[in-house]
Amino acid sequence: MKLIMAIIKPFKLDDVREALTPLGVQGLTVSEVKGFGRQKGQTEIYRGAEYHVSFLPKVKIEVVVATDLAEQVVEAIVKSAHTGKIGDGKIFVIDIERAVRIRTGELDAEAL
């Protein structure tokens, strides 16, 4: 099993969700986060005063899938979250040792 964690622009969330559903992804977790990468934040004007925003709003998506499905999920996220502009985000793929469904006690792939 693999945990796929994607940090994307907030307005791309629906596009990513719609791209993952046909692949059989049955659930995902979404968190509103803030951060910066190479773009180093941005300058904004509020009530005539200019100020620097160090952390930009992003969305973190976390989904656990079977290992054989992981590459398709990554490709779907890349295609659906891509804008071609700086700040499109990152995807991290992490090995998952064990999963347990609390309600039923199912383990690993059955728990997904």
Image: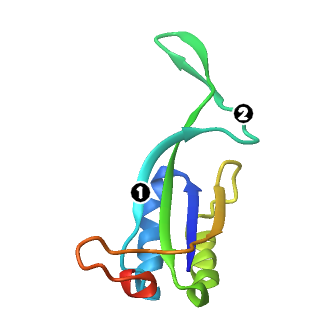
Residue furthest left as drawn: 103
Residue at position x 71%, y 42% from top? 37
Which type of secondary structure does the marked residue at label 1 adopt? Answer: strand
In the picture shown, does residue 83 fall above or below 57?
Answer: below
* Quadrant (top left, top right, bottom left, bottom right) of the C terminus: bottom left
Which type of secondary structure does the marked residue at label 2 adopt? Answer: loop
- Left or right, 58 with reference to 93: left
Q: Say which of 49 and 2 sits in front.
A: 2
Amino acid type shown at disc 2: Lys
Pinpoint residue 43: horizontal percent, then vertical percent: 64, 24
Numbered badge on residue 30: 1
Tag 2 and tag 1, C-beta contact below 8 Å:
no
Q: Say which of 36 and 99 sits in front.
A: 99
Pinpoint residue 34: horizontal percent, then vertical percent: 53, 38
Residue at position x 44%, y 74% from top? 99
- Left or right, 78 with reference to 63: right
Residue at position x 61%, y 73% from top? 79
The crowding category of the residue bearing disc 1, from other C-alpha atoms within 10 Å (few below 14, some 14 to 19, many at least 20), is some
Pinpoint residue 106: horizontal percent, then vertical percent: 33, 83
Pinpoint residue 9: horizontal percent, then vertical percent: 54, 52
* Quadrant (top left, top right, bottom left, bottom right) of the N terminus: bottom right
Numbered badge on residue 8: none
Amino acid type shown at disc 1: Val
Numbered badge on residue 40: 2
Query: Mark 2 or mark 1: which comes first in sequence?
Result: 1
